[in-house]
Image: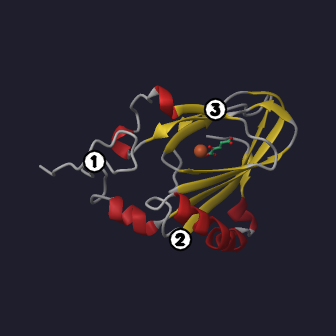
Amino acid sequence: MNKYGAILDDFGLQPVLDEFMKAYIQPFSTFLYPVLGQDLDSHHGFVVEYELGKDTNLGFHVDDSEVTLNVCLGDVFTGGHLFFKGVRCDKHVHTAPAAGECFDLEHKVGMGVFHVGRHRHGANDLTSGHRINLIMWCRSSHQRQARSCGNCSCHSPCPEWCGLYSGPQHSQ
Ligand SMILES: O=C(O)CCC(=O)C(=O)O
Ligand SMILES: [Fe+2]
């Protein structure tokens, strides 16, 4: 969790970001992620900031989103590469990644990274400078409802988009 940054929706940017999500993110999302990318209807928009002496990295996590846009706004920095370790459903979120699922991504200023929220990731240590990113967690209430099992997800079958999906399962 980042201590430094700001929630953009608190600054009156919610309508603008909503429009941006519908007009620009949704079409990409539908095309790239036919299951998890559909029906986006809300977002959480914020900026994160890294600097030596402040936050310098972000631990391994999944986002509270169906899809996430992460744009590197600046400034000048070294390190702070993103790392990814496989897409997982709730049931399998703490399982080990396969070697082929692990990769680092050098985030450059002006570059946007788009990924499903369930793609486990984090940010490596910043080694110098100041790094600021705009993050949009885009959500779909329709999808969340379809995935839920009452108040929990414990009995939901492993979905096809999970890296550990092993075919259809039968409920007991
Ligand atoms: O620092 C980054 O680029 C990653 C931020 C992130 O993953 C998040 O805020 O959910
Ligand atoms: Fe994240």
Q: Gap in Å between the C-alphas at discs 2 and 1?
A: 25 Å
Which of the two discs, 3 and 1, labels the residue nearer the N terminus? 3
Q: Residues within 10 Å of mark 3 (few under 14, many from 20)?
A: some
Tell me whether the residue at label 2 lies in contact with that at label 1, contact meaning CB atoms closer than 8 angstroms: no
Determine whether, in the image, residue 22 is placed left or right of residue 66.
Answer: right
Name the amino acid, label 1. Answer: Cys
Among all residues in the image, which is located at the extreme left?
172
Q: Which mark is residue 154?
A: 1
Name the amino acid, label 2. Answer: Asp
Ligand 2 shows up in the quarter that is top right
x, y (%) of residue 28? 60, 63
Residue 79, quarter of the rendered image: top right
Q: Which mark is residue 89?
A: none
Q: Residues within 10 Å of mark 2 (few under 14, many from 20)?
A: some
x, y (%) of residue 13? 73, 68
x, y (%) of residue 93? 41, 39
Q: How is the image coloured?
A: secondary structure
| Labels 3, 1: front one | 3
Quadrant the N terminus occupies: top right
Q: Which residue is mark 2?
A: 41
Does label 3 point to a residue whose CB lies under 8 Å from ligand 1? no
Determine whether, in the image, residue 95 is placed left or right of residue 167.
Answer: right
Q: Which residue is mark 3?
A: 104
Q: Residues within 10 Å of mark 1 (few under 14, many from 20)?
A: few
Query: Looking at the image, is 144 positioned above or below residue 68?
Result: below
Identified at 86% across, 42% down, the residue is: 75
Identified at 45% across, 67% down, the residue is: 141
Does label 2 point to a residue whose CB lies under 8 Å from ligand 1? no
Identified at 63% across, 65% down, the residue is: 25
